[in-house]
Amino acid sequence: MAKNGSVHGCIWRWGIAFSLVFGVLCAGWAQGVTDLAIRVTATSFQVGMPGRYVITVVNAGAAATEGEIGVVVDLAPGLAFHSSAGAWQCGPREGGAVCTTSTPIRAGQSSTFTLTVSVAREAVPRASTVLRLRYGPDLRPTNNAVLKTTTVRPSRRPIPTFTPSPTFPPNRPTWTPTRTLSPTISPTPSITRTPTATATPVPATTNLALSKAVSGRFVVGANGTYILTVSNLGPNATNLPIVVTDTLPNGLSFVSATGPGWSCHAAGNNVECAYSDPLPVTATTTLTLIVGVGSGAYPTITNTATLSYPADPDMSNNSVRRPTSVRR
């Protein structure tokens, strides 16, 4: 009987512990968290015809969004921003487009818009576009990026080539009354040469991984440092730019971002850095991000960063969240 009582007592105590943990999780959920996810559909594209991406942002959390939501689009070579339709505001950016909205997305609902692109012959036979969702208070950023690969068909009609033709015949010489030959020669027609298109490399498929570490202590009124590292897990070296976007939470402000081969700029709370050099297999590249620590960061904040590369087959290791303790 003592043995059975001990077993029942253990089960009873574990049941209470599980209930307490589950109650804490439920309480946190009830307080309101936001979990956004991005979904993209597209049909096959054809050179010379507009291509369309239908982009849907879903709120699977328990609270409505607050503030601006952004979608950063890294278009494949041969594609260029043309227009958009829907409640989102879209515009061109270097290498793609950016779309934003400040309309709240309620829990369990979604927001959809259409992005139209022009399609050139460099996109044949496949175009791989990366779309990254940008929203600071997101609970789970691992579902905030998607790689959309679309088949691209050649144009049905050949693109005409225009060859300049000089005007003939030239003016004939005329005789003056003094029998002096005064020919009037038409100027030599100038020929405009057609520029030779520069071949865009096909993205080399390789698996990249992003990690982030905190260097030193974060103290209100001082600067804090994050170390971001990109690793190439193979099987190929990169041949297109790697882009890392770090979304600073409230309480942190951008100071600087540096690293060999990296170029960075900040827009609001978003710090975007690009690495254009080839990254060999098994190699790593490091980026140092320095931020100002304000009182709004106390006692703890979570910083999120996302990596994008057009031919990364595994997006699960391209986003990292770093909880950070802040002291006064």
Image (cartoon, rainbow, N blue to C red):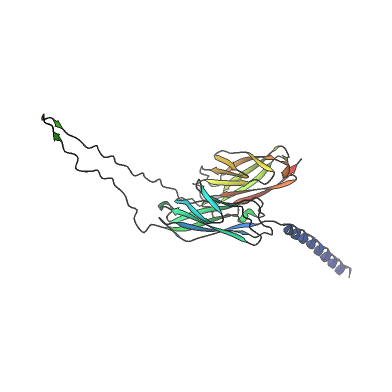
Q: Residue at x 56, y 54 (%)?
A: 88
Q: Residue furthest front?
A: 177
Q: How many marks?
A: 0
Q: Residue furthest right?
A: 2
Q: Residue at 87%, 68% (x, y): give it.
A: 5
Q: Would you say 8 lies left or right of 120 here?
A: right
Q: Which part of the image, by quadrant, shows the C terminus? A: top right
Q: Residue 282, how many percent across, how many down?
A: 56, 46
Quarter holding residue 222: top right
Q: Position of residue 84 (x, y in %)?
A: 51, 54
The residue positioned 68% from the left and 43% from the top of the image is 252
- Closest to the observer, 177 or 26: 177
On the image, the x and y values in percent for residue 132 come to 57, 52
Say which of 168 and 62 sits in front: 168
Q: Is residue 171 shown left or right of residue 144?
A: left
In the picture provided, is 282 more to the left or to the right than 300?
Answer: left
Query: Residue 57 is drawn in which quadrant?
Result: bottom right
In depth, the one of 41 and 287 nearer the eye is: 41
Quarter of the image where the N terminus is located? bottom right
The quadrant in which residue 44 appears is bottom left
* Residue closer to the observer: 282 or 201: 201
- Classify residue 278 as left or right of residue 176: right
